[in-house]
Image (cartoon, helix red, strand yellow):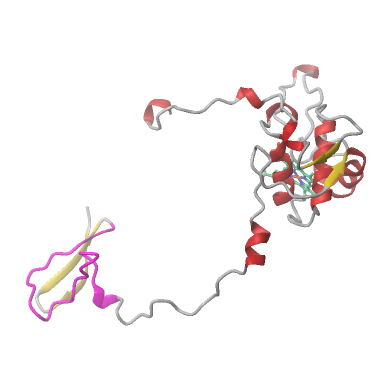
Amino acid sequence: MSWRKVHSMQGSTIKFISGALVVVAVSLAATSPKISRQHPGVLSADTLSQPSHFGFGRPATAAEIALLDIDVRPDGQGLPKGEGNVAEGRAIFQQKCAACHGATGTEGPNDRLVVGDTTQGGARRVKAIGNYWPYATTVFDYIRRAMPFNQPGSLTDEEVYSLTAYLLHANGLLAENARLNAKTLPKIKMPARDRFIPDDRKDGPEIR
Ligand code: HEC
């Protein structure tokens, strides 16, 4: 334990111990620094001269908040208007995604998006949308907020619906001629949906 003398004034000494404020008042004479009533141990004199705020920034506008408020829940709540299909998604994928995920979503160099058959040659089956993601709606949410990796937020809602349709189709979960929108997308049941169970383990060393 290390004691650090940080302030000394007219017979009273204030010391800090391990990050927590501990005030050792040798004498609480009238000339001692004032101790905050709300936060005993904190010297109000230290902060009195500072303004309550510094005048930086401004409240976010409704439009700015709307840009960030784009979460889509598992049940589809939050899905926007619009519609997409597999054919358009395939074309957009080649243009905006294939460079990183491969021509068919399996080649990389980045994450594999289509399960395909990875069991050939004893290779371990990888986790991808088709065998691991519990909700189809999350595919939409993720692409809309995070992809393309180098330009997130640049896709229109229609493009995201189409890309989601293409990826679900490529994973064998959606017919070629399906139309994907706020009504049809939440109805798709993912193969991994029931493979997740609530984690009720207690945190702590017993599970590490
Ligand atoms: C510049 C490279 C790049 C481009 C372009 C790109 N991605 Fe990605 N993508 C990544 C990387 C890197 C990750 C992994 C990100 C992470 O784990 O944080 C990823 C992850 C993903 C995932 C999650 C995979 C998983 O199972 O965890 C999806 C889905 C995805 N991308 C879809 C797309 C789509 C659709 C496009 C085209 C609109 C796209 N990406 C374009 C690099 C890219």
Quarter of the image holding residue 53? bottom left
In this rendering, the answer to whether 30 lies above or below 87 is: below
Q: Residue at x 14, y 70 (%)?
A: 13
Segment tinted magenta in the rendering:
19-46
Q: Residue at x 26, y 55 (%)?
A: 18
Quarter of the image holding residue 156? bottom right
Q: Is residue 163 magenta?
A: no
Q: Residue at x 49, y 80 (%)?
A: 55
Q: Residue at x 71, y 39 (%)?
A: 137
Secondary structure predominantly adopted by residues drawn in magenta: loop
Q: Position of residue 122 (x, y in %)?
A: 75, 17
Q: Position of residue 149 (x, y in %)?
A: 74, 51
Ligand 1: image quarter: top right
Residue 82 appears left or right of 15: right
Q: Position of residue 140 (x, y in %)?
A: 74, 43
Q: Quadrant of the C terminus?
A: top left
Which residue is outermost to the front?
A: 183
Q: Is residue 42 magenta?
A: yes
Which one is nearer the viewer's eye here, 134 or 30? 134
Residue 127 appears left or right of 99: left
